[in-house]
Image (tube, coloured by chain):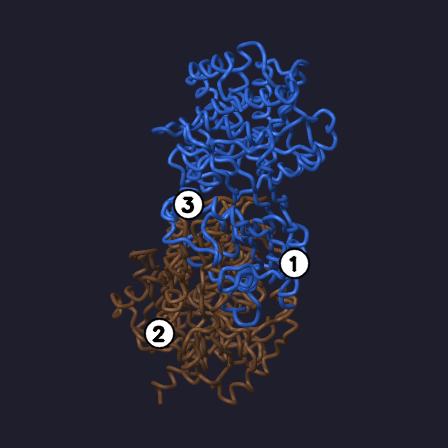
Chain colours: A blue, B brown
Amino acid sequence: MDQRPGLSEVQSLQFAQDNRNRYLAELKEFLSIPSISTLSEHRSDIQHAAEWLLQQLRTLSFRNSEIIPTNGHPIVFGEWFNPSNKLTVLIYGHYDVQPADPLEEWDSPPFEPTVRGDDIYARGASDMKGQAHAVLKALEAWLQRGDLPVNIKILFEGEEEIGSRNLGDFIDKYQERLRCDAGLNVDSGIIRPDLPSLVYGLRGTVYLEVSVHGPSSDLHSGLFGGIVHNPAHVLCELLAGLHDREGRVTLPGFYDNVRVLTDKEREELAHIPQSDEEWVRMAGVPQLYGERGFTTIERLGARPTLDVNGLLSGFTGQGAKTVIPPRAMAKVSMRLVPYQNNDAVIDEFKKYIHNNTPATVKSEANVLQSGPYALIDRETPSMRAASAALEATFGVKPVFRLEGGSVPVVTLIKDKLGVDSVLMGFGLPDDNIHAPNEKLHLPTYYRGIDAYIRFFGLIADQAKQRYDT
Amino acid sequence: MDQRPGLSEVQSLQFAQDNRNRYLAELKEFLSIPSISTLSEHRSDIQHAAEWLLQQLRTLSFRNSEIIPTNGHPIVFGEWFNPSNKLTVLIYGHYDVQPADPLEEWDSPPFEPTVRGDDIYARGASDMKGQAHAVLKALEAWLQRGDLPVNIKILFEGEEEIGSRNLGDFIDKYQERLRCDAGLNVDSGIIRPDLPSLVYGLRGTVYLEVSVHGPSSDLHSGLFGGIVHNPAHVLCELLAGLHDREGRVTLPGFYDNVRVLTDKEREELAHIPQSDEEWVRMAGVPQLYGERGFTTIERLGARPTLDVNGLLSGFTGQGAKTVIPPRAMAKVSMRLVPYQNNDAVIDEFKKYIHNNTPATVKSEANVLQSGPYALIDRETPSMRAASAALEATFGVKPVFRLEGGSVPVVTLIKDKLGVDSVLMGFGLPDDNIHAPNEKLHLPTYYRGIDAYIRFFGLIADQAKQRYDT
């Protein structure tokens, strides 16, 4: 593949270089909008963030730019079309963010973006307003010359952090309008600032809420202790029973369909230069823990997990209150891998809760989210263009890896639009996404803009070559 | 024992009868003060409640009435002395109350006392501002004749709901001033409005907070799930391991010193007319649960228990947040019975937590409260006077019972002042103490005033007989 940049790519890179200060100012503006999708009181902030993106698309003179309502939060859509271009890329991103609590653990307020050293701190900086903004700036850099080498469709949703609930219906409804040749999903990251990477596999997610109900209200633990079944005990027993002593999930059949890594994959993954010591430091734990027989990288990318994400019951304030709580609640999520079936896992989970709830209490388990895993062909033209763009930008070949997180939209786009997506984003493992002090590494963000500029040029070249031959 | 009332006792009962409307108005005033001892933001309300009581004592012309500071919340003290009286009774009560949350479950605001039917609803109505007020009104009824038949010392503390932290030191410091012949603890209740009872045993309490610490902050469950030990899992396993499948506490030696009920006691307890159906209804549970081989009444009064009172970890809001929480916390309390040793139980608990915490996380267990059990001689003059006062007021002999709750001050007063206490109070089992919609049954409250009036007369008669013979 010819990796020498064409003239307008060079000019675009120069333009991006010259405009970094303005980019940072814009990014701060975007990050100041608390577009938390899971909390209904932030509905107007969601709208505000969508309008901010729409304004960006209008400034770029994208056609048909609009905010399209869904049954939940709206989708921002826009397109660039030039009939002489051979290829259309659908860029996917999201403008919603995770809740910011616990607020007291932030060193600067989550929606007052603050630069400290090389990083900008704000909720959504890395996941993923930074990446959404970077790809828009790459498009802008091309467009200051008047045109883009590929046609672009933009789809930014507002419900990624709550399971992309309405995205499937949206894609069904606008299938014709979303037609494209390749997907670019910018909701991703690389391993280290000096080591780019490309993801070829993602875990799926199932997220449930489990409740156990006992007494009709708080009971005095002296007056009733010993004669009623405490729902907090039942919940703890249910949750404790979900793992065996080896840390494996006990749900029947849970591991039956799990894809076995090839020897080649295990070897490649073993070469990813991330030590257990680095993971210990990033997690801030005394030591790592996990399923026997697998390396850290394998546990993260290729093995399914189950985590309790939240627990609540009874009195949790300062001091002592001797109550038997009326109910106990847990949030539980699972990360699923190829070729596990979400619905089958949900069924087994519900069956487990139901079968293990004693008659002295009542329980329920409700699904809050369910999204599939993804496995991506490494040899698509987009993957090759992305790989070359990263190598040109970072000076080293990217490593291929399996990602522990979930980007269910990748599967959705493959299923509904028939195209593979390349996952190219510029978050870093220690960006504290979904946690206090989320940050974005600014030098990597600027390199990200450059890499996107190159990607559009390279994928256009490939398409042209295909058509020319 | 001569149970015919003397003239001034009759007049006192009549006075109490005539003043019920005023009593209710006063009680409402007292109940409006949110004197929650465990929450530091209610410090001024605690002071307000103490001053309200002081004003009551001053109105009664009690000598030496004062608010005495401690290292925590102050103690209200006052005394009535007539050299011709043969006996001094120390009345114990507390003016602090439990927190009122969950607020949304109250049908009327917890600190806006509201009468519905025969009940007055307010936090602290039954536990125990109602009883504190009732005994003051009994004293007032005697004093409208100018004198009391016994000498009285009053000790109302403000830290009962947080473990009476400073009461032991206070009694040590003022031992001389608190010298008395008998104790009357009004922090108690009866079985039903038509069935009075006297408590001869109380369970002790140990209250601990357990924390498990893992990652240094929230981690993304996709990026870290599978390689770090989730502290919520560890906590659930620790808590689940505290009971065996029979519902017995697993701490080594926990049951070793538990006092075995005599056949006579078991027979008496079996005659307490409270059915399991009533307990099911009061608790609002699908069915009862408890240690095998014991009746409901025995489980409540004579068997030790362990309850999780609160659980907190991670994300507990609306919707989904995929975090691995950095820590998980539980409040755990135990009700201990004769002849268990609080310190030995605490040691075993801490050892259990420590020994079962894997190296992948850290844990701690801190004692928030520890109070001993009590076992009271039924044949003291006070117990006989109390029994007669209840019989005269309710028209039936009281039943003797073991109480599931804890009144550590009974043991404290026995140990430090050398006197037994009679526990005579007028709460009812369905008063929702420590829970939303706490209430006080007003007809029982008025009868309580009458019973206290008779008690002072009867115990004075007994003392006179002893001195006269």
Residue A293: horizontal and vertical position, in percent? 48, 58
Whole-angstrom CA distance, mark 3 to mark 2, is: 35 Å
Q: Nearer the viewer, residue B385 or A220?
A: A220
Q: Name the residue tied to disc 1.
A: A348
Whole-angstrom CA distance, mark 2 to mark 1, is: 43 Å
Residue B378 visible (yes or no): yes
Q: Nearer the viewer, residue B146 or A280?
A: A280
Q: Secondary structure at mark 2?
A: helix
Question: Do callouts 2 and 1 mark residues in contact (Cβ within 8 Å)?
Answer: no
Camera-near label (1 vs 3) is 1
Discs 3, 2: same chain? yes
Identify the residue at horizontal 50%, vertical 26% (top origin): A389
Q: Nearer the viewer, residue A384 or B418?
A: A384
Q: Name the residue tied to disc 3.
A: B217
Camera-near label (3 vs 2) is 3
Looking at the image, residue A352 sits to the left or right of residue A307; the answer is right
Q: Nearer the viewer, residue A325 or B203?
A: A325
Looking at the image, residue A172 sits to the left or right of residue A375; the answer is right
Identify the residue at horizontal 56%, vertical 87% (top origin): B267
Q: Name the residue tied to disc 2.
A: B344
Residue A75: horizontal and vertical position, in percent? 64, 28
Q: Residues within 10 Å of mark 3 (few under 14, many from 20)?
A: many
Residue B145: horizontal and vertical position, in percent? 43, 67
Q: Secondary structure at mark 1?
A: helix
Q: Secondary structure at mark 3?
A: loop
Residue A249 image-quadrant placement: bottom right
Q: Chain of mark 3?
A: B
Q: Residues within 10 Å of mark 2 (few under 14, many from 20)?
A: few
Q: Name the kind of residue labelled 2 in the image.
A: Ala
